[in-house]
Image (tube, rainbow, N blue to C red):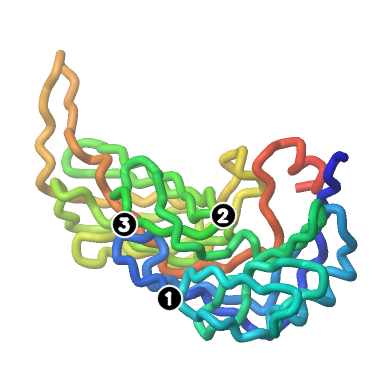
Amino acid sequence: MQSSFTECQPIKGPEWKWPSDDFPQSDLYHAKISSTLYESFVINYDCNKARTYIEKLINETLPNTTPGAQNQLLPAQAGGIPGFVCVAYPDAIGRAYGGECRSGLVRFAWNYNVIWKGVQSGVEGRTSGSNFEPMAEVEYDTVLTPLGNGRYQLFVANASGIGSIDSFTWAAPPQLTITAVTGATGGPTCDQDGNSISCNGKLAPPKCLCTGSGGSVTITFTATGAVPEIRNGVPIVQGLSWSYMHVTAMTPVPRLIPDVAAQAKKNNV
């Protein structure tokens, strides 16, 4: 039997708030994310029937309110759904802001792109074992380019399945000491914050995770400390890839951002 996937209309409900992410090396450490809309989808099921159950679930306070805790809700339990085994995750105040319910090949889920599961991130360049990311992960592309004479260019693009990046802080590599932010193009405003650069302003989410279609900003700044090594007449600066970006606020989209071009075309995005 071929499964039938349907993205449903967003569900409006009580405001959910991102669980407290207290891992200092996480991309979303203490990030501010909230919404009154809930993404939902079904597999081999009806959106309207799922909506009725989801509207009940998102008003439930879960038994285990620890951030990232997996709460299993059985049909006979308080808060359970007849005929379904559900797994739900608590938001900052313990309500079931995201999860899924299954019955054989039938499945429905809500806020799947922003479920925070405390799963370690294996993204290259980040400390293994100390990064904990949501289901869709908060991904971004950064490119740091030396321009010469102590000038640098930083390119940041949103590649996240969660939504828009509203503010972030980029910490410079340890070899660099930032002296000034000299410009920013693309929307957000950016300023020096110690040896970091803080930016405020939306970077739009990508239309598809398969393309570089997310919003971006290009920042120019000056810094001291990195001394290039000349190899075959070419200046090479070692170690500039080990910078760190911390996303401090996001606005989630109440839908699943497609990760293949065919799905993006089907969704007319």
Instruction: Say whether residue 51 is visible.
Output: yes
Q: Residue at the location (87% across, 59% down)? A: 45
Tell me which residue sits at (86%, 53%) in the image. Answer: 44
Crowding at dot 3, Cα within 10 Å, few <14 / some 14-19 / many 20+, comes out as some
Marked residue nearer the N-terminal end (3 or 2): 3
- For label 1, the SS is loop
Q: Secondary structure at mark 3?
A: loop
Q: Nearer the viewer, mark 3 or mark 2?
A: 3
Residue 257 percent coordinates (x, y): 67, 52
Q: Amino acid at mark 1?
A: Ser
Q: Which mark is residue 130?
A: 3
Density class for disc 2 (Cα within 10 Å; few <14, some 14-19, many ≥20) is: some
| Sequence-first disc among 2 and 1 | 1
Label 1 and label 3: CA atoms lie apart by 15 Å
Q: What residue type is disc 3 on?
A: Ser
Residue 179 lies left or right of residue 66; in this view the side is: left
- In the rendered image, residue 152, in percent from the top left (x then y), is placed at 27, 44
What is the three-letter code of the residue carrying label 2?
Answer: Ala
The numbered mark at residue 212 is: none
Residue denoted by label 2: 136
- The image position of residue 223, as x and y in percent, is 17, 50
Neighbourhood count class around disc 1 (C-alpha, 10 Å): few under 14, some 14–19, many 20 upward: some
Residue positioned 77% across, 69% down in the render: 10
Q: Which residue is mark 1?
A: 20
